[in-house]
């Protein structure tokens, strides 16, 4: 149980940093450990599931959020946060009648004042606009349907930033998603998960002297019914390469992903990255944030005050802040969570505000 609580704490810290995939990995590990425990606590299980549901909400994965929130409520019918997240997920899935049913159930619980206000407001909105919302959603689906059609060209895409240089042995998280030529994906195109093959291809005529390794926790790599997949991977020297000899200098490669054949999506185009340079292990991953810092440097003076809102979407953004702080002072602006705006339950809890000023 102590290890489980530690994983929950780790997940909470990662969530606060906006590292939702990493936080979810900790929560999932805690769930597995709790499943294997001789005396699993339903209350603890409910808390972890509700936390994992919140990571899905932040990434707009409403179906997966609903599944976890619903399971959290089953484990602990008094878990108010789980009820709230189930309502939010359900409404965003456009299941308005079900959302109204869930919020009415939520109102039978003992709620604090802000949560009660949220529940009553949500109930009123759903009751008043249920029919019109459903009609609007239907019209919206029709408009989107014009762009999601039988003649569309589906293709794989990278959903996360890839480095231009990658140290050998360093892990990176890569997200893939399926979309058509308009960047749209309609649920129902994939009736079940489809295996995804990830490989690397070199540019040297002498062959590639690094190989690809995928974290066992990411296996199997599959595109889910939501059209998305994620994998943690790294490059390692091939058995014939000695890093000290400097032969890694010739290792330029591209990352390629293909969907497996025989799953009714054989015409989905693969995705290939821009060239990535393998560099020694002691180097730093380069995510090309310098142009952004350079733009701020050129456009400002020490008398200029910049207000920046930041919502972390990639763990390597730390490099941007490290680079920024060499030339700018960053002052975090605290958010008054007692105010009506910032105390709202549906607000993005990971958004941070900064005041930035160029150093003299």
Image: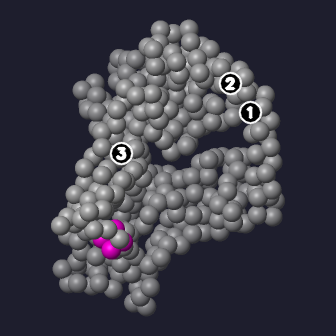
- When the figure is inspected, residue 339 is found, relative to residue 197, above or below; the finding is above
Q: Residue furthest front?
A: 303
Q: Which residue is mark 1?
A: 133
Q: Secondary structure at mark 2?
A: helix
Please report contact status of discs 2 and 1: CB closer than 8 Å, yes or no: yes
Residue at horizontal 44 percent and vertical 78 percent from the top: 275
Whole-angstrom CA distance, mark 3 to mark 2, is: 30 Å
When asked about the image quadrant of residue 162, the answer is bottom left
Residue at 69 percent across and 47 percent down: it is 187
Residue 195 lies in the magenta-colored region: no
Query: Which residue is identified by label 3?
Result: 352
Task: Check the picture and name the quadrant holding the C terminus.
Answer: bottom left
Depicted 212 relative to depicted 333: above or below: below
At horizontal 58% and vertical 38% (from top left) the residue drawn is 62
| Whole-number angstrom distance, CA of label 2 to CA of label 1 | 8 Å
Is the residue under label 2 in contact with that under label 3 (CB below 8 Å)?
A: no
| Residue 41 placement: quadrant | top left
Q: Vertically, is 57 above or below 121?
A: below
Instruction: Name the residue carrying label 2.
Output: 126
Give the x, y percent position of residue 38: 34, 20
**Dominant secondary-structure state across the stretch colored magenta:** helix
Residue 171 drawn at (x, y percent): 33, 60
In the rendered image, residue 296 lying in the magenta stretch gets the answer yes
Q: Magenta residues?
A: 294-298
Q: Nearer the viewer, residue 117 or 158?
A: 117
Q: Is residue 25 visible?
A: no
């Amino acid at each position: 149980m102590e290890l489980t609580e530690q994983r929950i704490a780790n997940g909470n810290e990662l969530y606060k940093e906006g590292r939702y995939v990493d936080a979810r990995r900790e929560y999932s590990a805690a769930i597995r450990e709790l499943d294997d425990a001789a005396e699993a606590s339903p209350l603890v299980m409910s808390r972890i599931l509700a936390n994992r549901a919140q990571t899905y909400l932040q990434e707009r994965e409403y179906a997966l959020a609903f599944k976890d929130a619903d399971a959290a409520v089953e484990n602990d019918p008094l878990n108010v946060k789980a009820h709230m997240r189930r309502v939010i997920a359900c409404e965003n899935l456009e299941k308005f009648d079900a959302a109204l049913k869930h919020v009415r159930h939520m109102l039978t619980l003992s709620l604090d004042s802000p949560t009660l206000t949220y529940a009553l407001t949500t109930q009123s909105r759903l009751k008043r606009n249920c029919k019109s919302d459903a009609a609007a959603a239907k019209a919206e689906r029709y408009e989107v349907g014009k762009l999601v059609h039988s003649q569309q060209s589906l293709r794989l895409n990278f959903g996360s930033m890839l480095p231009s240089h990658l140290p050998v042995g360093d892990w990176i998280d890569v997200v893939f998603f399926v979309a058509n030529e308009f960047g749209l994906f309609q649920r129902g195109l994939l009736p079940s998960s489809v295996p995804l093959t990830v490989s690397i291809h070199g540019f040297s005529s002498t062959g590639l002297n690094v190989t690809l390794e995928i974290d066992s926790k990411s296996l199997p790599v599959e595109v889910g019914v939501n059209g998305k997949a994620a994998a943690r991977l790294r490059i390692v020297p091939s058995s014939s390469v000695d890093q000290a000899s400097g032969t890694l200098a010739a290792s330029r490669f591209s990352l390629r992903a293909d969907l497996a054949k025989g799953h009714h999506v054989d015409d989905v185009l693969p995705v290939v990255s821009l060239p990535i340079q393998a560099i020694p292990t002691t180097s730093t991953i380069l995510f090309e944030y310098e142009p952004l810092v350079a733009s701020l440097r050129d456009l400002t003076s020490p008398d200029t005050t910049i207000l920046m809102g930041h919502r972390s979407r990639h763990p390597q953004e730390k490099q941007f802040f490290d680079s920024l702080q060499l030339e700018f002072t960053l002052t975090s602006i605290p958010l008054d969570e007692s105010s009506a705006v910032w105390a709202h339950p549906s607000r993005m809890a990971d958004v941070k505000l900064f005041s930035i000023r160029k150093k003299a």
